[in-house]
Image (spheres, rainbow, N blue to C red):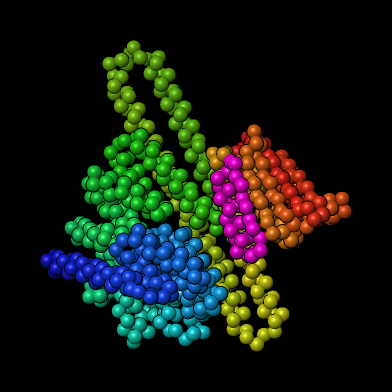
Amino acid sequence: MFSHFKKLVFIVLLCNFSTYSQQKQINTLKEKLKGENISDSLKIKIFGDLGWYYGNINTDSAFYYTKKGLNLSFKKNNLKGIGQSYNDLGIIYYRTSKFDSAVYYYKKSLKTRTELNDSVGIAGLYSKIGIAFQKTATLDSALFFNNKSIRIYENLGLKRHISINQNNNANIYQSLNQLDKALEIHFDILKYRETTKVPIDLVNSYTNIGNIYFKKKKYNDSKKYYNKALSIAEKNNFNNVLSVIYNNYGSIYNDEGNSKLTLWYYKKAYDIRKKLNDVYGLASTTANLGIHYYEAGSFNKANIYLQESVTLSKKINAKEIELNSYRFLLLLNAHLKQPDSVLYYQKKYDNLNNQILNSNITKQITEIEAKYKTEKKEKEISIQKEKLLKQELALKNKTLYTILLLAFIIILSIIFIGIYKKNQFKRKQLQKEIDLKDALATITTQNKLQEQRLRISRDLHDNIGSQLTFIISSIDNLKYISKDANQKLKDKLSNISSFTSDTIHQLRDTIWAMNKSEISVEDLHARVLSFIEKAKSATENIEFEIVEKIDKNTSFSSLIGMNLFRVIQEAINNAIKYADASKIEISLQKNKNLFEVLIKDNGIGFDLNTVDLGNGLSNMEERMNNINGKVNINSKLKSGTEISISISLKNTADDV
C-alpha cells in the first residue's frame, strides 16, 4: 500500500509540473501577441495554440481564445484558420463530454477542409467524429466514419494513424460484445506498436487489452496488461489513461471482495478526474463508489455518491450511468423500507429506461422487421411480442388483484373496526408490509421484462444491425477497389449504398414513432428540425425557415405522430425535388383546437386542374384521411405552392 501511496504523490507532482509547463507556454504566447507588426495568420495560430493549452487548465479561457481565432479567420477569410478553429472547438466540447456539440463543430470543420482538399485533416475529422459517435453508443455511425478515415490513411501510407483507427474499431466490436474479435485486432495492433515504441500508443493498446480481459473476468490477465500500461502512463503523466485504469482496478478488487483496495483505487480515479474536469469519468466513478457502499451496507455514503452520479450524468446526458444510479437508489430505499422513495425512483428508472430503449435499443427490432421481412424473422419477433404482451397482461392482472385485495381488507376493517380496535396498529403495519412486498414484486417483474427486451434487442442488433452497416462499408470499399470498373457500375454501387443508407434512416424514423406509446409536439418538432438539417446538407441553394407557435405539452398517439411527420417529410421533399425553390418555410402552430402545419415554397408552382398529383401527394391525402386529418394543396404557376395540414387535438393521444 505504501508503494501505491508513493505513486499517487508522484502523479500529483507530475500534474503540478504539467500545469506549470502549460502556464509557461501560455505566458510565452501572450507575449508574442503583444509584438509589433505581427501578421494576422500568426495571430490566428497563436489564438488556436492558447485555446489548446487552456483546454487542460481552464475551459472558459479555451473557448474564449479559440473563438477569437475563429472570428479573426472569418474576418480575413482565412479558410485554414476557420477549419482549425472549428476543429479545436469540437475538441473542447469532446473534452467536456458534450459529444453532440463536438460532432456539430467537427462537421463544420470537415466542410472547410474539404474545400481546401486537406486529406490528412479530413481523415482526422472522420476519426474524431467516429469516436464521438462511439461515446454516444451510435455504433453503426462510429464504424462508418472510422472506416472512411482508415481508407484515406491507407492511400496516404500513414501506418500509425491506420493503427489508431483500427484500435477504435476494435473498441466498437468490444461494445458490441464481440470480445474475441476485438482482442484479435488489439493484439495485431500491439505487434506494430511494439516496433514503433510510441508511449501513448503502447499505453492505449495495453489498456484496451486489459479492458477486454476485465470484461471476460480474467482478472490476472487484465492486471498484467494494466500494469504494463501503468508503468508507461505514470512516467509520461497520461492522466486520462491513469484514471481509467485506476477505476477498473477498483472494479476488479470489488469483484474479488477486497473492499480496502476497491475504495483506494476508486478514489484515486475520482481525484484525477476531478482535476481533469472529466464529467463523464466522474459520473462513472461516483456511480461505482455508490454501488460499492451499497453492497457493503453503508447506505448513507451510497446515497451521497449515487445522487452525485445522477447530477453529473444529467449534465452530459449520460443516460446509461444515470439509469444504473437510479436502479441502485431504488434498491437502497427498498432495503430501508421507504415505499414512497421506492415508487419515486421506480418511476425515474422506468421513464429513463423507456427513453433509452426507444432511442438506442428497441428501435433495432422494428428496423430489422421492416428491412428483412423474412418469414423466420417475422415469426421470431411475433413470438417475442406475444410473450411481452402476456407478461404485461399478467402484471396488470396482478395489480388488479392487489387493488381488489386491498379494497376487501379495507371493507373488512370497517365492518370489524369495533372488534379489532385494540389491534388496529398491527393491522396497519401488516398492510404496509403487504404493500411493500407487492411493490418489490412489481419491480422485480418489470426489471425481468425490461432485461428480456434488452437481451432480445441486443442480440438482434449485434447480429443484423452491425451486418447492415458492414454491407454499406463493403459497397463503399468495392467502389474504391474497382478502379478500372466502368462508370455505370460505379454509379450503380453508389446508388445501392445511398439507397441502403436512406432506407436505414427512414426505418429509424418509423422506429422512433412505433416504440413510443405517444409522441409529444416537442418530439415531432425536434424530428422535423433533424430532417431539415439533413435536407440542408443535401441542398445548397435553398433557404429553410421554421416558424413555431406550439404547445410543447400537447401529445399525439404514435400512429398520428408518425403520419404527421411522414406528410411533412413528403411535402418538404416535393418542394426540394420539383419546386425549383430558393426558400421553403415550415410553420407549426396551435389554432384553437387544431394542430396546423403549413409548408410553403416560392418555386415554380403548378396548375391543380391539369397536373397529375402522383403517388406522393395522393399518399399525403390518404395518410391524413387515416387519422381524421385534412390536407389542402394550393398552387399556381410561377407563384409557389402551399400545403396546409390540420388535425383536431381532441383525443389525439388515443389510438385511432
- Horizontal relation, residue 24 to residue 592: left or right: left
Most distant residue in the right direction: 610
Q: Residue at x 33, y 73 (%)?
A: 35
x and y percentages locating residue 298 in the rendered image: 22, 46
Residue 390 placement: quadrant: top right
Q: Is residue 270 above or below residue 188?
A: above
x and y percentages locating residue 98 in the rendered image: 42, 58
Most distant residue in the top direction: 418
Of 180 and 476, the residue lying toward us: 476
Q: Residue at x 75, y 57 (%)?
A: 603
Residue 379 visible to an observer of this rendering: no
Q: Is residue 499 magenta?
A: no
x and y percentages locating residue 646 in the rendered image: 69, 41
Quadrant showing the N terminus? bottom left
Quadrant showing the C terminus? top right
Q: Residue at x 30, y 49 (%)?
A: 308
> What is the span of residues highlighted in magenta in the rendered image?
521-550
Query: Looking at the image, how many numbered discs can be counted on the residues?
Result: 0
**Dominant secondary structure, magenta:** helix
Q: Residue at x 63, y 71 (%)?
A: 497
Q: Is residue 7 above or below residue 488?
A: above
Q: Is residue 362 above or below residue 239?
A: above
Residue 487 visible to an observer of this rendering: yes
Residue 220 placement: quadrant: bottom left
Q: Is residue 537 magenta?
A: yes
Of 644 and 615, the residue lying toward us: 644
- Horizontal relation, residue 259 to residue 356: left or right: left
